Structures are given as structure tokens and as C-alpha cells.
Amino acid sequence: MKIVIVGCGKVGASIATELNSEGHDIVVVDIDQNSVKNLSDSLDIMGVEGNGATYEVLIDAGAESADLVIAATARDEINLYTCLMAKSAGTKHTIARVRNPEYTSDLYRVKDQLGLSMAINPELTAAVEISRLLRFAGALEIDAFSRGLVELIKVAIPQESLINNKKISEIDIFKGKVRICSVERDGEVYIPNGDFVIQGGDRVSIVSKPEIAAKFFRKINVSIGRSRDVILLGGGKVSYYLAKTLIKSGTNVKIIERNAQRCNELAEILPDAVIIQGDCMDQNLLLSEGIEHADGVAALMDYDEENILISLYINSVSKAKIITKVNNTSFDNILDRLNIDCVIHPKNLTGEYIARYIRAMQNSLGSNVETLYRLNEDRVEALEFRVRKSSKITGIQIKDMSLKDNLQIICINRRGKIIIPQGSDVIMPDDLVVIITKHKGLSDLDDILSRH
């Protein structure tokens, strides 16, 4: 697809990187010459310097023939106006980055008039991901398929677990309802078969319905309980959205924020949360506010360095589920060596969500990839396909398929019925099929077959 991205900041760069990796024809636009040059050079894509909210610059960028224009500047009003101008230039679809909670809640009233295909809010997106992780406090990562009917959940296996030192084929708890899909061990990632032996310390991803997964984890002695008392460090937009979501689910929420004016605003818009004015880096304050006894803590301050440092401290004094917001991906190598389990990159999430939307657009144009997640530092992909009548794999038992190595069929959604497949199961047209693999770039379900 031909895609124009207006705005070369962190969000725009993340979106461009994600979409460029999937083979789209990308043009980036920004008023800052250096930002355009740096991004276009690093990704080897076309860049246009200028105000992307103007008709002339959009035409220079090729908006009249573009399949999609994404407005990702720092200002909501400019993004919405850019989408309006892009539609007038002839762009088929538009996406706007909109951060203001007041705009987000009102957009449905003017979406059609603006010709807006989708609005993406990075802070709200991050809050949704964090709330999902706090729902399963013991989970390291959670990804949803089939509109949440089935989830891929990563956990660490303790030494005292019931499945420690067991072959996967010997694990008969909820057989047919739970599948172990991938295992991380000593820096390696495995797509395991039945002979693979699970060891304490492994990071294991399982696929199942959420309610079955919770029972499975309890059976194998993996602590997965929901966070009931959560402390949010920093009172920014992510904290606001997250607090609203958590309070709605019955969670007790406390927000610590340095700025007195922001504390007053939060107290007004979040009457059911406890708002504390203070320095989130003050260890004595954290201890006095019960950080030792919290079920969950999210470090959501403006500076990555502060979030990382305070997460390390909290990990030394509390057993809480700790989630750390980090915007700068250059910290990833450092984070891998630190004892920080759950890191959220709001800017990257935005790119991933937009990429999923584009895959759905492509699905209507011929591709059959519905959803794609990049897992284990991009070493593994989990993809959801819609099965077409012409597919080579329909009507064949899974055990008789010649599948590629390092690949598993992990779930079938048949008109809302979730099937964790066994060897005798057969894939039918219109099924949604989820596979996990170390192979990159699969674009069609038939690509899962070995060519031998």
C-alpha cells in the first residue's frame, strides 16, 4: 500500500518503521528538515519537507494517489485538519493521532464529516495494554486474538511448578483446552514439540480462553492473581486512562504526582482514586503510601530513566507486578540485562495497532492475515488468518499436513467456538486460524506448508 505519514517525531517514526518492515511504500512529511532527512535516510524511504496540513505539501507527498494518510504530529487539531485536507486531495483512508481525552470521547460525532477511518490515542492504547497485564498480575505479556475470545499469555515457570521437568506430552491438565506455544530459555526461543521438557525459570507462552488460562495457572502453581491495589507513579494521560479502566473493574487506585495543579485536576476527574502530591522518586514516600503491599505498580513518569530506576527499587522492596513505561527503544539492550519484567513502549504500540488496522484493510483486498503480533523481541510471530475456500490446507487432518519446522497451529476459531487443535482436527473454510512461528513474512495461510 502507498502510505503518507505526516509527523516525524517518535510516534511517526515508530509507525513508519513498523509499516516499512511490512513492505509498504512509505512517504514521510515534516516541517523539520532534519527530522525528515534522518528518518527517510534510516529507513531508505521518501521524505518531503513542509507543512503536511496544507494541500500543496500533501500533493507533493502523493496524497492524491495514496491508500492511506496517517497524521501523527504532536497536535491533535493539526492531525484532524490534515486528515480533512488529505480526503479533499483524494486519499482513500485517513488515520489521526488524537491524545486529548475530550477530543477522543467526542470524535464519533464528527468522524464521518472528517472522513476519518480511525483515530489512535497512544496513551489510551498503552493504558489498555497495562490494564490487561494487571488483570493477570503474574503474566509477563498478553496478546489477544479473535476479539479477545482467546489469549496468548507469557509467564515465568517457578521451580516448584507442577510442570517443572515434565515433557509437554506428559502435561495432561486441561488437555485440548490449553497449548504451550513457545518457550524462552537462556536467550533462545523454542517452538516446542511434545518431547520438549519444561524447566523452572522458563518463560512459557500458552494459548487458551482467558478463564481456562486462569485455572491452568493455578493448577501448575503459577501465581497469576488479579491486582486489587494499584499505585500509579506519575499523573499523565496514561495514568488517567489507566485509572479510569481499573476503577471501573473494581480496583483500588492511588496516583502519586509531583505537580500540585495536576493533582487538583486528577482529583476532580477521578473522584474514586486517591491522589497524593509528592515526588515519585522519594523512597520514604513510596514506603509510607504502602508500596510494599501493593499488588501492582506502574511507573508512568515523563522520564524513562526515572521509570527504570524506580522500578528497580520497587522490585527490591515489593512483590507487586511492576510495569515500566519506556519511550526510548535504545534502552532495550540495557533493560534486557536488568530485572525488569514488563516494559511498555506507548509509541511502538501505536505503530503496531495501526499495522493491525492496515492488515484488516488488506484482508478485504486479498490478503488473509487478520492479526499479527511480534513476540520475544521480534524473534517469533503469531498470526491470525482467515481461511479461504481455495486454501490447500482445508479438509486435511493437521497430523497429515507437512508443516514447516518451528511452526505450530495453536488455535482455530470456528464461528465463535474456540478449538485448541489436536492432530485429528481439520481446518474448514471461513475458520480463523492462529499460528506461531519463527519464520518471518508469512502472508498467506498456505505458506505454513513445507515445500519438500
Image (cartoon, helix red, strand yellow):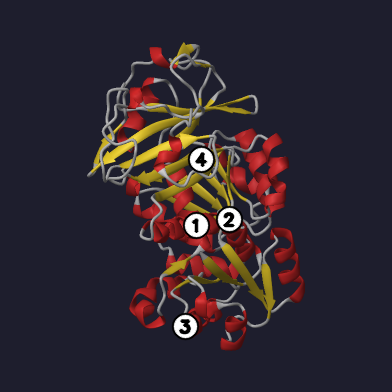
Please report whichever mark, 1 or 2, sits nearer to the chain's N-terminal start: 2
Q: Find residue 153 and report its horizontal and vertical position in percent.
A: 44, 36
Mark 1 vs 2: CB contact within 8 A? yes
Q: Find residue 20 and report its horizontal and vertical position in percent.
A: 60, 58
Mark 3 vs 1: CB contact within 8 A? no
Bin the neighbour count of mark 3 within 10 Å (Cα to Cα): few under 14, some 14-19, many 20 and up.
Answer: many
- Which secondary structure lies at badge 2? helix
Question: What's the amino acid at mark 4?
Answer: Glu
Mark 2 vs 4: CB contact within 8 A? no
Query: Which numbered marker is on residue 355?
Result: 1
Mark 4 sits on what residue?
A: 381
Q: Find residue 81 and report its horizontal and vertical position in percent.
A: 51, 83
Question: What's the amino acid at mark 1?
Answer: Ala
| Residue 411 appears in the picture as rendered | yes
Q: Nearer the viewer, residue 436 or 249?
A: 436
Please report whichever mark, 3 or 1, sits nearer to the chain's N-terminal start: 3
Q: Nearer the viewer, residue 434 or 8?
A: 434
- Which secondary structure lies at badge 3? helix
Question: What's the amino acid at mark 3?
Answer: Leu
58, above or below 248, in the image? below
Mark 2 sits on what residue?
A: 18
Residue shown at 46% from the left, 20% from the top: 193
Bin the neighbour count of mark 2 within 10 Å (Cα to Cα): few under 14, some 14-19, many 20 and up.
Answer: many
33, above or below 446, in the image? below
Please report whichever mark, 1 or 4, sits nearer to the chain's N-terminal start: 1
Query: Which numbered marker is on residue 84?
Result: 3
Mark 1 vs 4: CB contact within 8 A? no
